[in-house]
Image: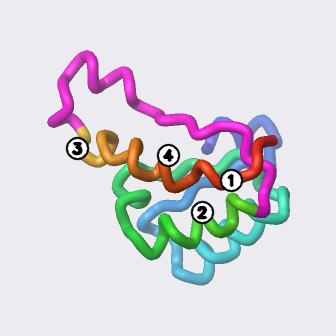
Amino acid sequence: MIALERLGIQWAASITSGDTPAAKQRKLEEFQTGSIRLLYVSPERIRIRSFAIDLLKKAKSASVGALIIDEVHCLSEWGHDFRPAISRYRDFERRSKGCREG
């Protein structure tokens, strides 16, 4: 994110554990309206049911073109124990099928 900010890219954001609840909600709303077009979310955050449901609701009315799994290359290199939460993306992907394609 720091590199994107240095390049002047303002339409990308991440939701992290350091964000306040209000900041997380603001970023989700900006994602829904299209102000944020690239949203980084950790595999562990997707496993939080309330967050995943909120993200899916926002994504259904946003123009989402792709779900990108960062660090997935680590699965082949270090195995599924590297970040077990990554293996749960399949569930999230199935639930996101109703999202509009961008």
Q: How crowded is mark 2: few (under 14 residues within 10 Å), some or many (20 or more)?
A: some
Which mark's residue is nearer the viewer, 2 or 3? Answer: 2
Q: What element carries label 3?
A: helix
Query: Disc 3 marks which amino acid?
Result: Pro
Cβ atoms at labels 1 and 2 below 8 Å apart: yes
Query: Disc 1 marks which amino acid?
Result: Cys
As rendered, which of 74 and 92 lies closer to the eye? 92
Q: Disc number at residue 99?
A: 1
As rendered, which of 95 and 32 lies closer to the eye? 95
In this picture, which residue range is highlighted in magenta?
61-82
The residue at the point 41 percent across, 60 percent down is: 45
Quadrant occupied by the N terminus: top right
Query: Disc 2 marks which amino acid?
Result: Leu
Query: Disc 4 marks which amino acid?
Result: Glu
Q: Name the residue under label 4.
A: 93
Q: Is mark 1 on a helix, strand or loop?
A: loop
Q: Earlier in the sequence, mark 1 or mark 4?
A: 4
Does the segment drawn in magenta span residue 40? Answer: no
